[in-house]
Image (cartoon, rainbow, N blue to C red):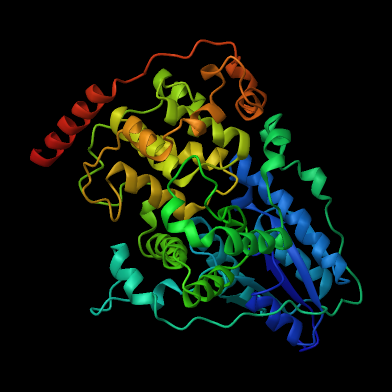
Amino acid sequence: MPETSPILLWFRRDLRLSDHPALKAAAGSGRPVIAVFVHDEVVEELGAAPKWRLGLGVSAFARRLEDMGSRLILRRGKALEVLRALVRETGAGAVWWTRQYDPDQIARDKVVKAALGDDGLEARSFSGHLLFEPWEVKTGQGKFYQVYTPFWKAVRGRDVAGRIAAPDKLQAPENWPQSDKLEDWQMGRAMDRGAAVVLDYLHVGEEAARTRLAVFMRDKIETYARDRDRLDVDASSGLSENLTYGEISPLALWEAGQRALEAGKAGAETFLKEVVWREFAYHLIYHTPHITSKSWRDGWESFPWKTESAATLRWKQGRTGIEVVDAAMREMYVTGRMHNRARMLVGSYLTKHMLTHWRVGQDWFAECLVDWDPAANAMGWQWVAGSGPDAAPYFRIFNPDTQAAKFDPARSYRRQWLAELSSSPPKTALAFFDACPRGWQLSPNSTYLNPLVDLAEGRNRALAAYDQKKTG
C-alpha cells in the first residue's frame, strides 16, 4: 500500500488524545488518519453499566476529535468484518490500535492482526494502557510475579515512558466514510431508569479526568494514606472510572504521584502503590487468563460454593440485614461505583459468610459498575474469596460490623445510603429506589430486614469449610 494511504486508528479503551503512542505515531506520519470505534463482539457482551458508560465516553471523545477538525467513525459488527469493510471504503493501508490484555480482547486482536496481515495491511498494536508491558516485568528466574509486594519492588524504580502531548491536528482523508449514529446503538438501554440517577455522579471524558486528578493532588493526596479506607470520607481520586475507558493514562497518574512524592506529600507512595496494584492485575490476567473464569489457585474448584439463590438476590438488593454491606450495594446502584473498602466487605460477606461462589459477585459487579475493569474485577473477587493471588491468609474473614465501626464510626456512610435507618432519609438513600430494577418492587417504607446470615454463625461455617478443604 502507498505510504500516503490512510491509517485506520481503532479506538477501544483509550478514549483520549494525550499520552497516546498510536495517535502520536499516526499524527506524525503525515498520512490521513481515520479514527474508528467499533461496537464489536467484545462491546456486545458488556454489562449494563459499563456498556452505557462506554457509550458516554465515546460521545465525549467524538466531540474532542470534532474540536480539532477530525471525526470519530462509528460502526457496529464483528471487528474484523467492520475493519475490512472500512479498508475497502477508504483505501487505508494500515490499522493501528492500543493493546489490551484480557483474554477476550487478546483473542479478538489476534484474529484481526493475522487476517489483516494476510490482506497485505500493516496491522500494528501500541502500548499505552499500562505503565509496564506484562512480559517485561520478570522475577530473577525469568518468571512472572505472583505476589504483589515483590512486583511493586521490581517496578517502583523503573523508568517509564515520557508524557505525550495531544496532537494539534490530524490529517483528514479526501472523503470520510459513513458513520453510524451513536444513539441508534442504544448502549444505555439495559440501564433503564438507573441511568438518570447515576449520571449525576459521573465525570466523563479526558478533560473531566484531568480536572479530577488535579483536584485530588491539590486537596487529598496529603491525607490519602490515612483516609482512603474511611467509608465516611471522600478521600479517593475517583479515577478508576476514567482509567477503565482510557480517558486518562496510568502514566499521568504515575507522574503526578511522583511529583507529590518528591514534594514530601504523605500519601504519595500509597497512591503510587494503588496505580501499581492495577498493573499487577493486568500482569496476572495476561499470564494467567484463567483468573477471569475459574479459581486462580489450585484446589479451589472443588470448594463447596453455593450458586444463585433467594439469598444472593437479597445480597444484590442490599437487603442482607448487615448495614454496611447493604449500604455499599446501594451506593453502587446510585453512583455506579463502590468504595474500595466496601468492595472487600460485600465480597467477603458473599463468599465467606454466605459461602457463595465469587463468580456470582464478579458477574454482578460486571453488570453494575461503571468503572468495571476485567483485570481488577477478577483479581479483586478471587483475592477476597481466598482463591486468588495474594490472598494470604486465605481464611481471613472480615467482620462487617467491626469494619464499619472502624471506618464509619459515626454511621454517616450507612445513613447516607440506607433509607430504612431514618424517619427522614437523605436524597442519596432515596435515590436507590429510583435506580434499582423495577422488578424488585422495593420501597423506602419497607422494614429493614434481620441479618440474612448471623455473623458469628457465618464465620464459623466458613472456617469449617476451609478446614475441610485443607484436610480434604
Residue drawn at x 34%, y 30% is 401
Q: Which quadrant holds residue 269? A: bottom left
Q: Is residue 12 visible?
A: no
- Residue 184 x, y percent position in the rendering: 81, 44
- Residue 462 x, y percent position in the rendering: 22, 31
Question: Which one is nearer the viewer's eye here, 431 or 100?
Answer: 431
Q: Quadrant of the C terminus?
A: top left
Q: Is residue 86 visible?
A: yes
Q: Quadrant of the N terminus?
A: bottom right
- The residue most toward the right is 174
Q: Which quadrant holds residue 64? A: bottom right
Residue drawn at x 73%, y 50% is 56
Question: Which one is nearer the viewer's eye here, 221 or 363?
Answer: 221
Residue 157 appears left or right of 150? right
Q: Compared to 414, does 103 lie above or below?
A: below
- Residue 20 x, y percent position in the rendering: 65, 74
Residue drawn at x 48%, y 14% is 448
- Residue 65 x, y percent position in the rendering: 81, 67
Q: Compared to 274, does 364 lie above or below?
A: above
Q: Compared to 434, does 162 lie above or below?
A: below
Q: How many marks?
A: 0
Residue drawn at x 55%, y 58% is 220
